Image: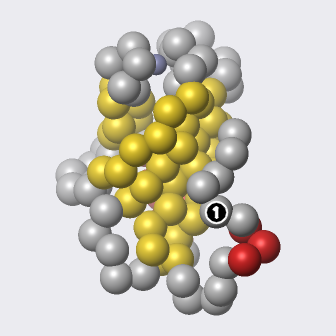
């Protein structure tokens, strides 16, 4: 998956968090992947995702409000849970 920025060019403190996680489908196979990040001072998180259900790649922005955090695949409209990601994001 391609990020809309170069990881090497990130300055310290520019991002509130940046994390990459495998996403499992219903058969618990890690077919998908998501990279989520939020820049310091922004309310919206941005993501690029490879949907574990339809395997299409897409990107978007969202404000995570209530747990478990979820995004909806814009291609197949399935809900993708980010519960694992949430735990690790909190640690940072
Ligand atoms: Zn999908």
Residue, far left: 66
Tell me if 8 is positioned left or right of 4 in this view. Answer: right
Whether residue 45 is situated above or below residue 55 in the rendered picture: below
Write down the residue under mark 1: 5
User: Is 78 rendered above or below residue 21?
Assistant: above
- Disc tally is 1
Structure colour scheme: secondary structure
Q: Nearer the viewer, residue 82 or 75?
A: 75
Give the camera-side residue of 28 and 44: 44
Residue, x 78% and y 73% (percent of image)? Answer: 8
Q: Dot 1: what SS?
A: loop
Ligand 1 neighbours mark 1 (CB distance < 8 Å): no
Q: Is residue 10 above or below residue 6?
A: below
Residue 23 visible in the current orientation: no
Which residue lies at the image location 50% right of the left edge and 62% below the top edge? Answer: 37
From the top left corner, tell me how far across and down residue 51 is, in percent: 53, 25
Question: Could you say where residue 19 lies in the image, as x and y percent from the top left?
Answer: 60, 59
Residue, x 36% and y 26% (percent of image)?
Answer: 74
- In the image, is 17 to the left or to the right of 7? left
- Residue drawn at x 31%, y 44% as measured from the top left: 68
Q: Position of residue 58 (x, y in %)?
A: 50, 33
Quadrant occupied by the N terminus:
top right
Question: Does any portion of residue 16 appear in the rendered image?
Answer: yes
């Amino acid at each position: 998956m391609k990020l809309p920025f170069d990881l090497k060019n990130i300055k310290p403190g520019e991002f509130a968090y940046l994390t990459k996680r495998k996403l499992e489908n219903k058969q618990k196979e890690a077919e998908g992947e998501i990279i989520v990040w939020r820049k310091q001072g922004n309310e919206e998180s941005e993501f690029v995702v490879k949907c574990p259900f339809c395997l299409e790649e897409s990107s978007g922005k969202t404000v995570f409000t209530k747990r478990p955090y979820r995004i909806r695949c814009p291609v197949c409209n399935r809900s993708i849970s980010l519960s694992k990601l949430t735990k690790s994001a909190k640690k940072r």
